Amino acid sequence: MVVRTNVSGAERDAGLIFMKPGDLSAALAKLEAGFLKRERKTPGNPCGPEMLLNGRKLIAFASNDYLGLANDAALKNGATEAIEAWGVGAGASKLVSGRLGIFETLERTCAEFAQREAAVFFPSGFLANLGVLTALADRHDVIFADRINHASLIDGALLSRAQHVRYQHADIEDLASKLANTPVASGSTRLIVTDSVFSMDGDEAPLEALMALALQYDAWLIVDDAHGLGVLGPQGRGSIADAGLKPHPNLVMVGTLGKAAGVSGAFVAGSKDLVEWLIQRARSYIYTTGASPMIAGALLASFERILHGDELRSRLQNNIRTFRSGITALNLPYTLLPSRTGIQALIIGDNETTLHIASSLLDQGFWVPAIRPPTVPAGAARLRISLSAAHTPAHVQGLVNAIGLACA
Ligand SMILES: *Cc1c(COP(=O)(O)O)cnc(C)c1O
């Protein structure tokens, strides 16, 4: 066997080595021995607070469906109507066979939602992040990225071949010093790239300070609002609106629509020129078949529900309050990270204990994912409790009690 050089630190620590086809079973066994092997659950019912698993009913705290829209009647109706009007397939990529009319409506709606000049729709957030970073940066440029950005932003930066400078998590002083000390060739570009709400921690980027630095250096600021959209800001318009940032040509919003919006896909919103450039140059936009019209139909209904969703958001906030005060009262030897969003992270530490607690919760009827390396750093394995407006107060209180028992 040969040591692979492009494995993550955690995988290397676990002694994960493989190269040839015949090495895979040994590599998988190593993952299993290190409590790092992931198993896919296969629910037998739609996404929601209750999950049917092998005939058992569990209360699930695992999805990013923060507003409970994934199985919402209005969204399903929107999808059905779009199928009737537009069919189920796009035919080819947009630059080849065209962008169906319902996607023009969707992109206009996305731009209005983000309160920006224009928006372009990608089939997923992963593709949107790859597209933005590779269209705006190349090997002459420098990307300044928060250390714990989402995997798609890391991969986009790598794919762009730009210099990738990672600053300490949410640390403005570290970013400012890296901006000041990283030489950039004349005629090249700086990009500052961040999650708005960090997907495994639930804390938030200091957007106002990041924007000030972006203006100081005439850099792009790319904000991936996967977990803020629908949840934060007036009418759920997201983290940028919540921070009160004004539209600016340097400011780019990636709005992922598979989380609170309950469907799938993502938009990139910004200036007209930015969007026009992405259509010309974002390979993950150009060389992929357009999303199904049913996605657009569901999303148009979803935007309506989000914009008029203050009641959903207040239900979510109530659940967050119930959960946080309940966990605090348990006085556990574990840290509950600060978060005002649906992402609540209880840091346990080692993989084995985290899996043990998660499996005790499962025995008690609660499905909470154990998040382990390489998704989070070694030694920071955690329960990632994902709260939704669709959970009842009794679901949340039940989970708090079960965590108390599991950790006793
Ligand atoms: C989920 C997520 C993505 C990827 O979006 P998909 O639509 O699931 O591909 C990108 N960024 C962040 C921060 C995410 O949490």
Image: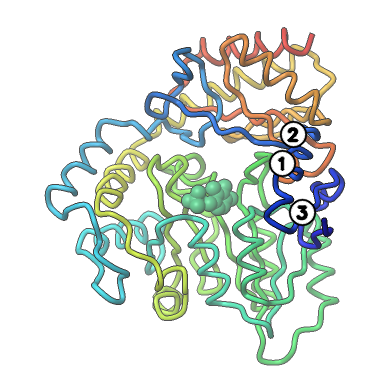
Residue on which the image places disc 3: 18
Contact between labelled residues 1 and 2, with CB atoms less than 8 Å apart = yes
The x, y position of residue 200, in whole percent, is 66, 41
The disc placed on residue 32 is 2
Q: Callout 2: few (<14), some (14-19), or many (20+) C-alpha neighbours within 10 Å?
A: few
The x, y position of residue 284, in whole percent, is: 46, 68
Observer-side mark, 2 or 3, equals 3
Q: What is the residue that sits farthest to the left in this orientation? A: 85
Comparing 222 with 349, the one in front is 349
Figure colour scheme: rainbow
Q: Is residue 33 above or below residue 81?
A: above
Q: Position of residue 370 (x, y in %)?
A: 68, 30
Nearest to the observer: residue 35 or residue 372: 35
Residue positioned 79% across, 44% down in the render: 377
Q: Is mark 2 within 8 Å of ligand 1?
A: no
- Residue tagged by mark 1? 28
Which amino acid lies under the numbered mark 3 shown in the image of this protein? Answer: Phe
Asked if disc 2 and disc 3 are in contact, CB closer than 8 Å, the reply is no
Left or right? Give the position of 34 relative to 292. right
**Which quadrant would residue 326 be assigned to in this image?**
top right
Question: What distance separates the C-alpha of mark 3 from that of mark 1?
Answer: 9 Å
Q: Amino acid at mark 2?
A: Glu
- The quarter in which the N terminus is drawn is bottom right
Quote the CA–CA distance across marks 2 and 3: 15 Å
Q: Secondary structure at mark 2?
A: helix
**Tally of marks:** 3
Residue 60, percent across and down?
Answer: 52, 22
Quadrant of residue 138 in the image?
Answer: bottom right
